[in-house]
Image: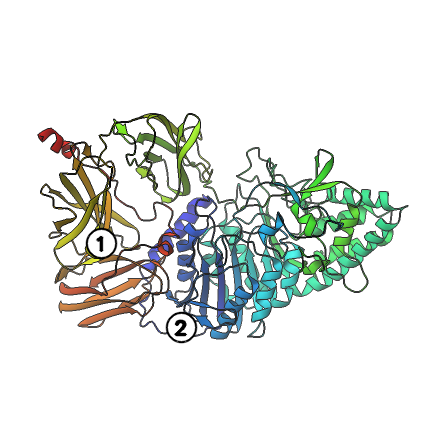
Amino acid sequence: MKTRLLRCCLLIGLLLSAMLPPIVSHAAPQAAPLVAIYILAYDNRLDSPMNLTPYYAQTLTSITNATVGQPNLTAIVLTDLSGMGDTHVRVVQNGNVNTLIGLPDRDGNVDSNLKEYDLTDGKTLGGFLLWAKSSFLAQIYTLSYIGHGVPVMPDIEIAAISDPERPASINLPPLPTRIGANADVTDHTLPSSAAYSALSPNDLALALAIAAPVGPRFAVLDVLMCFAGSIEALYPLAPYADYLTASPNYAFFDPTMPGNALIGLNSNPSSLQMAEHIVNTYHNQLPSTDHPRILSIIAADQLAGLKTSWDMLSNAIYLSLLNPNQRPATRTALFNAYLQSKKYDLTYCEPSDWQLDAPDGLVDLRTFAHALSQTFSNLNPQIANLALQTRDRIRNSSGTSMVVVYRVADNDYPWFDPTPSQWIFDGPSALSMDDDAAGLSLYADLQGLPVTGATELSWHAHWYHDDATQPDNPNPLAFLADLGQRNGWDEVFQEYWRDINLQTALCTPSLPATRDQATPRADISLSQLGPSENNLAVNEAIRLNVGLNLSRAVQRSDLRFEVVRNGTLVFSDSLQLTNLNPGSQRIYAQKIWQPTTAGVYSVRVIGDSGQHVQESNENNNLLSRSISISASTLRRPIINANTHNNLQLSNSPTLTLNLQQQAGSGKPISSVLIQAYQYQASAGNPRLQTPILRATTTINQLSLPNVEMSLAGLEPGAVLLYIWGTSANGSSLIPAIVRTNYAPLPATINQSQKHVFRFTLKRQQAQTFKLQSQVGNSNLHAWEPYIWTAPTQQATSNGIDQISYSSTPIAGEYLVQVSSTDSSRYLFTAMPNPQTGRNQEVVSSRQARPIFVEPQPFLPTHQVFMPAVQQ
């Protein structure tokens, strides 16, 4: 039921978008008393099931809808998607979205040529926050950082973990000797290299420090990442916020959570109430089953006192470890306290146990302190007393002067555990909090894994020290710094493992995607694995396809095609699928398979290979068949096509196409069949459109490369052409696809119609769209990429309407819509007429299929092989 409610919330958001007020102008927005800043670190691997980029449009829509009717609220959204040159900033007010041209540099000045950020770089983030706070002065600021996280991340590059420079004599746990899971870390595409990076507490603290001189500190700093709720991660952030919200374990995510938390946020009079509003919204929106979680609110001003208490306790334990007479008993007391404390997951090297238990290296700090007070009660009463003081500083029954001021928890079984073990955050006693996790973690890897001849710790162990002279850790975690003459927890950790043979393993976690838990559960099945053609030959272009059947709607899944010959994988293509409706649909591979060797191949497709959906039947997600590829030279034709000069708009009813037959694809084509599809615009979302076959044209007299076809009879708007070639060897297996737009001069429209044009534009491109009403009054509206709420620009004057971009702010698909309040006649032109040339900047941020529903490529059966029969 909870998942159904989530889906309804999204539907409500889409319906609201149709009622948003229009943008009067494209002027710079004004400041508001509350400014909510969002950093969306959605730059992940394109082929990863954990890629957050497909969630961007929903996230932005939820934030946009939350600002409707809220004049005292401004949202600033910094987004980095999975590609190069796609980082951008959007300012949202009252349902209207304005995109910044360029990006703020490290000094907070907008650089119109800056296109890509590393969202883990403190100076880069600091420049953005400095610009945001300077440009939008406010009484209250909140900041939400959303993305993949790594627990207790040192201030180093991820690549340095496996090969840093360091003297061999350092008395530290060794560098990782076993490399395991490689995470979808915070930022996968960096401006300066092909490497990837993870956000460290030091970098986030540096960013906050750079922006701190401007305006008040943040009322709430919301870090929506896995494992962000550690004392090591939150301590350096304390000077820059009133309250911190985070999870010490996995942070489950729904793309509408940020917007839902923004609704009503400015009605809370205090920073604490705002933090509670955010945490409660997240908690109430997530499903009540299969998503065990703990979310905490940390009073930032209390963290310094907690560090003092913890350092005093750590110093006493360290001195006890140094005493040869007390060392064995002290190690035993530490180990027993570790066993008794509650854990957060840190064993995600294969095989991962997914249990919150030893040997996990993250402990709940309060339950650990409580256990220390018990295990040292007889051995060292001073340590026991200091442990009690630390415990009560974190959370106490009186509710005064404590660090964790609010928490929500849900005990349950995680959906991604194949052998479920319950995660228990709240203990059985309702009268005592000593058996409850507080929701603040500490790195305490005090057991490790037994391996041959050694004990294996997590990779964090090597960097868990405060010695800034070490070349591979020049900026240690601030929480580990020794205050005064005391020794801290890192010295305890290193001394605990002294003289023991150690090794470490590098495995970093990924954020699990939320699975569909509704009842009845969805079922995904596969049928009719294509191609259906026989007599396939070497070097033919084959587009694998399969029938995908769903018993109910699914928010996200995936599909993987594989071709194997003699036990060797020779072809694969993985598709990320979103917003799947119930029923049957045919899904086509994005890549083309061209076999180079004759023989028998095994073709198979795996549905929901990433286990996104918990199905009623998990045994019908694999379909396979054999395909024979002959050495025949009777290959079917492969056609390449584009519009004349690659122009995206035709004002003429006659469209000139440039057609070429790919070399080596059989005998010359003798005719082409062109299918013209157009999109029926959705009332609520112009980006979700259904294709309709409008016309089919057969041209038998060819004079390549130029082919002319008539657009007369088509509606004004976007046109999608599927072009098939036929030769003596047969017809194309796959069509050439041409995208264009048609606007006859003049075009007619009535009040019930919307003519939607789709243009692919590069970043920093000058572009103007002009609408001249000849009869009646037509209006012009435009949407920038990823936006489906209120138009980002519109012109509604009588006579001539014009929308201009002196420099387009982001690459992608721009929608331009013509509407009318009466029956009217208009002239629509684009200046210049943009070319379709797609460069890497555009296609690198490809969307998961099927965001835009496209027609299934089919050749009418009565046309197949007809020219060959006639010969």
* Disc number for residue 29: 2
> What secondary structure is found at the residue carrying circle 2?
loop
Q: Quadrant of residue 453?
A: top right
Residue 344 spot, x, y in % from top left: 64, 45
* Disc number for residue 740: 1
Q: Is residue 14 above or below residue 455?
A: below
Which residue occupies 20% across, 58% down? Answer: 649
Residue 545 spot, x, y in % from top left: 32, 35
Which residue occupies 39% across, 55% down? Answer: 57
Tell me the distance, in whole angstroms, between the alpha carbons under discs 1 and 2. Answer: 34 Å
Which residue occupies 15% across, 41% down? Answer: 672
Question: In the image, what residue type sits under mark 1?
Answer: Thr
> What secondary structure is found at the residue carrying circle 1?
strand
* Disc number for residue 666: none
Q: Give whichever of 127, 253 is nearer the camera.
A: 127
Which residue occupies 12% across, 63% down? Answer: 746
Question: In the image, what residue type sits under mark 2?
Answer: Pro
Residue 491 spot, x, y in % from top left: 77, 53
Q: Earlier in the sequence, mark 1 or mark 2?
A: 2
How many tags in the picture? 2
Q: Give whichever of 673, 705 is nearer the camera.
A: 705
Question: Callout 1: 10 Å neighbours few (<14), some, many (20+)?
Answer: many
* Tag in front: 1 or 2: 1
- Is residue 386 visible in the rendered image? The answer is yes
- Is residue 776 visible in the rendered image? The answer is no
